[in-house]
Amino acid sequence: SSLRSIITSETKSLSSRIGEMFNNLFGYNSPLTKFSFAFNQVTQAFSKVGNVFNNAIDFEARMTDVFKTVNIDDLSEDQAEQFMQNFGDTISELATSRSSSVSGLSDSMSELFNIAIQAGSAGIKKENLAEFVNTIGELVIASDLSADQGTSEIASLATILQTEEYDRLGSTIVGLGNEYNATESKIVSFAQRLAGVSSGTNISTQDVLALSTAMASVGLESEGGGTAMSQ
């Protein structure tokens, strides 16, 4: 059909562009990090550490909730305790540090813990949990994605595509949302569905994101578009 031809043509150019993004839009210079860091510089002046989990008992309870969702069976008791301590320190740093790109989140400590709990339940490995939480926090600030959608759909997408490069994936999604007539939430929804129906076909992350952006750009809806294009 003509619509399929348009999407196919757009996908080819997008696939090449995403290849560039995967190589260049990573780290501090990525649109995801730059946007969220800039946003944080404005909002952190109005936030106070005293507003986030003053009560140490609440903090400990949320830490326990996180580690109910991740597999720490391979750790000794001492190792598990140290891992929990390190993760708690990381969350505290992300939520309160002036240099953190996600401390501008509303009720940042609580939000980050909620992301961590959902991520652990979605199968994110304990060693990748901190990076994943930071990436989703940045996406919430820099895009129209909610924490719930970002966590569930990106965790699913990354699992299907067998990638653990969460920061690079998030940066690329924001870059595509900035450059093309497609919101990040629609790109992610399409990508998650396309990756699911294309599982086992060796389709690359680059191609999934290219096709998802092309479909979102022409106004298709992910509920039907993903299935139609996989046929």
Image (tube, grey):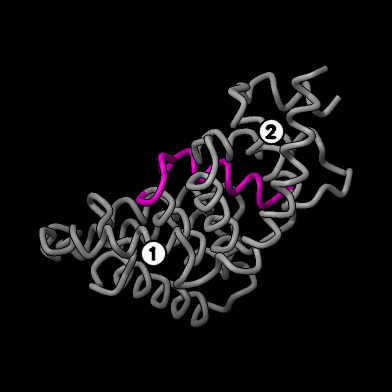
In the picture of the structure, the residue carrying the numbered disc 2 is 193
Q: Residue 218, position in %: x, y?
A: 62, 26
**What is the total number of numbered labels drawn onto the structure image?**
2
User: In front here: 170 or 116?
Assistant: 170
Asked if residue 19 lies left or right of residue 38, the reply is right
| Residue 192 quadrant | top right
User: In this image, 9 relative to 109: left or right?
Assistant: right
Q: Is residue 154 above or below residue 165?
A: above
Left or right: residue 204 versus residue 66 is right
User: At x 73% / y 35%, what residue is drawn?
Assistant: 194
The kind of residue tagged 1 is Lys
Q: CA distance from mark 2 to mark 1?
A: 28 Å
Question: Which residues lie in the magenta part?
Answer: 141-160
Residue found at x 36% / y 55%? 113
Question: Which residue is under mark 1?
Answer: 34
Whether residue 147 is in magenta: the answer is: yes
* Residue at 59% across, 31% down: 217
Residue 148, compared with residue 162, is above or below; it is above
Q: Residue furthest right?
A: 201
Assess whether residue 218 is covered by the magenta stretch.
Answer: no
Mark 2 secondary-structure assignment? helix
